[in-house]
Image (cartoon, rainbow, N blue to C red):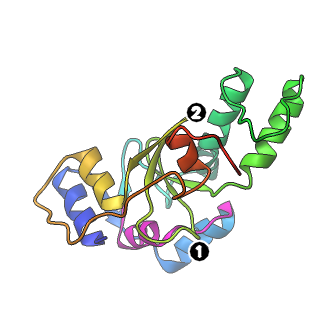
Amino acid sequence: MSIDDCVTILTARGVTLEAGLSPTEIIGVEERFGFEFNPDHRRLLETVQPTGERWLDWRNESPASIEARLAWPLEGLLFDVEHDSFWPSTWPKKPDTRAEQFQIAADRIATWPMLVPIFAHRYLPAHPFSGGAPVFSVWQSDVIVYVNDLVDYFLHEFGPVDVQRIGSAPDVGPDTCRPWSLLAFGSDVVD
């Protein structure tokens, strides 16, 4: 995966790019919000900080806004728990009260790999997921593997430009980033 390719795509599509985050800024974000960027996401943000509508501006956005974007996947799943469309068969029997349901769901989902927002409701798994991580589209329990990696994501989301990929993105399957990938492939969640 080439960060230069990502920058070329974003520049060609008119995305506003600010200077990348310093190592101190990256560490500050990770410590404040309790995760580590995966290597691809980190390299992108060290190179450039995309800004504008629907981008998460790690440098200038309020902590409350960042926390809300980080919480989006959990809140979406809890919404579907509340409306009876999400309760994996591998979880304990669904309790009668919403409070108990939410507690079980939140406890289970807290063990899943954290998803970190890129743009709108598109997310990359946090570290320890290695480079070449899939990009997920997350809308409540409707989770899909949007594309196989960051370059493919920018090509897909912002349209093709004259970028020649060297090699191909890794194949993504149900076991790539469980349990998020299990949801994406319509498999029962095993966490």
At x 88%, y 28%, the residue is 95
Quadrant of the snapshot with the N terminus:
bottom left
Q: Is residue 102 magenta?
A: no
User: Amino acid type of disc 1?
Assistant: Ile
Q: Quadrant of residue 164?
A: bottom left
Residue that sits furthest to the left in the current view: 162
For the residue carrying disc 2, how many other residues have a C-alpha within 10 Å: few (<14), some (14-19), or many (20+)? some
Q: Start and end of the magenta stretch?
A: 33-49
Seen from the viewer's position, the closer of residues 170 and 59 is: 170
At x 40%, y 67%, the residue is 132
Residue that sits furthest to the bottom in the current view: 23
Pick whichever of labels 2 and 1 is earlier in the sequence: 1
| Percent position of residue 81, x then y | 72, 28
Q: Which element is circle 1 on?
A: helix
User: Amino acid type of disc 2?
Assistant: Gln
Seen from the viewer's position, the closer of residues 92 and 75 is: 92
At x 87%, y 30%, the residue is 99
The residue wearing badge 2 is 140
The residue wearing badge 1 is 27
The residues bearing labels 2 and 1 have C-alpha atoms spaced at a distance of 29 Å
Rendered position, 71 above or below 99: below
Q: Is residue 35 magenta?
A: yes
At x 44%, y 65%, the residue is 41
Rendered position, 87 above or below 27: above
Q: In the displayed structure, does residue 53 sit left or right of residue 104?
A: left
| Percent position of residue 57, x then y | 46, 55
> Cβ–Cβ below 8 Å for labels 2 and 1?
no
| Percent position of residue 22, x then y | 47, 76
Seen from the viewer's position, the closer of residues 171 and 126 is: 171
